Image (cartoon, grey):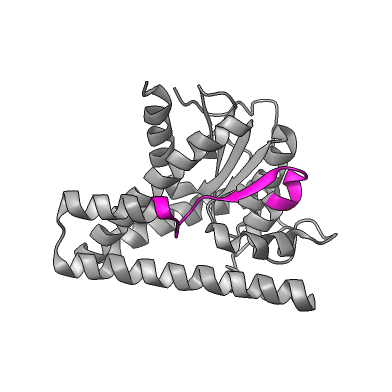
Amino acid sequence: MASPARVDDDPDPRITEEYIRHVAGGPGTLTLIGVVHDHPASIYRTQQLITACKPTVLALELPPISIPLFEAYAATERTPPVFGGEMSAAIQAASSAAVVGIDRPTGGFFTRLAKELFQERPTAKTVRNVLSNTLATTKHAVRCRAAASLATRTAVRLEVDSPVVYDIDWTDPPAAQAADERNQVRRSRSFMHAFRTSNRSRATQLEDAAREAAMATRLVSLREQGDVVAVVGIDHLDALTERLDAETQTP
């Protein structure tokens, strides 16, 4: 059964049980860290927990083919790295851990997505939205790989995505960072509920279900190698934990 990580001995408000999970069972420990992309509080939480856990495997909510780019971002003396947000910060903190991308596009994701579409039989417009989203994320993953190749050959570091800018930064007190992070989570969820069309919302639900199912299966297999820490978006944290519970308890 999954349970929040115990962080009672750390008074820093950026490290909160709200965004951390341990999944019991399996040959290795599995810790999930929920993050808000590029947020200082999330980056701090990621760095501190990975340093403390010393995992054998670091699993990131990134496409496998984009991992070399974030490894290039992490290869700097600056902490946290300039580029790559919490993902490159996680790689830097993980030291000798094996780094694995667990998000789409992967064969497991496409298999799960086809199954979701077959079972749910959504409208044609919803299917088009799903395919459009999938094509866009695949193209982005390919751009990440191309940028990594350029970095390897020329030592040029390209920021594929513009970093998200928040009202707070590293100079603000930890409590202010933590409060802003919670506000960002609330705003994001409110925006999705208020402005997405029904077809767009349904497309996102189907795609997320396929993503989370594929990521859960991959994480279960990675535990065979040892202790695993996974860094995922906060909105995936509970759904992914539930799937991991189910897969871990299945004979």
Q: Position of residue 72 (x, y in %)?
A: 73, 64
Q: Is residue 245 visible?
A: yes
Q: Is residue 161 visible?
A: no
Left/right placement of residue 14 relative to residue 238 reads: right
Judge by depth and name the residue closer to the eye, 134 or 198: 134
Q: Which residue is at 64% across, 26% downward? A: 8
Left/right placement of residue 157 relative to residue 18 reads: right
Q: Is residue 139 above or below residue 16?
A: below
Q: Is residue 214 above or below residue 128?
A: above
Q: Position of residue 68 (x, y in %)?
A: 66, 62
Disc tally is 0
- Within the magenta stretch, is there residue 87? no
Q: Quadrant of the C terminus?
A: top left
Judge by depth and name the residue closer to the eye, 200 or 128: 128
Q: Quadrant of residue 216?
A: top left
- Within the magenta stretch, is there residue 99? yes
Q: Quadrant of the N terminus?
A: top left
Q: Which residue is at 81% across, 62% downward? A: 76
Q: Quadrant of residue 104?
A: bottom left
Q: Quadrant of residue 10?
A: top right
Q: Position of residue 93 (x, y in %)?
A: 74, 47
Left/right placement of residue 80 relative to residue 203 reads: right
Task: Specify the segment rendered in magenta.
Answer: 91-108
Of all residues shown, which one is farthest toward the right? 77
Judge by depth and name the residue closer to the eye, 84 or 171: 84
Judge by depth and name the residue closer to the eye, 116 or 88: 116
Q: Position of residue 118 (x, y in %)?
A: 19, 53
Q: Which residue is at 16% across, 59% downward? A: 122
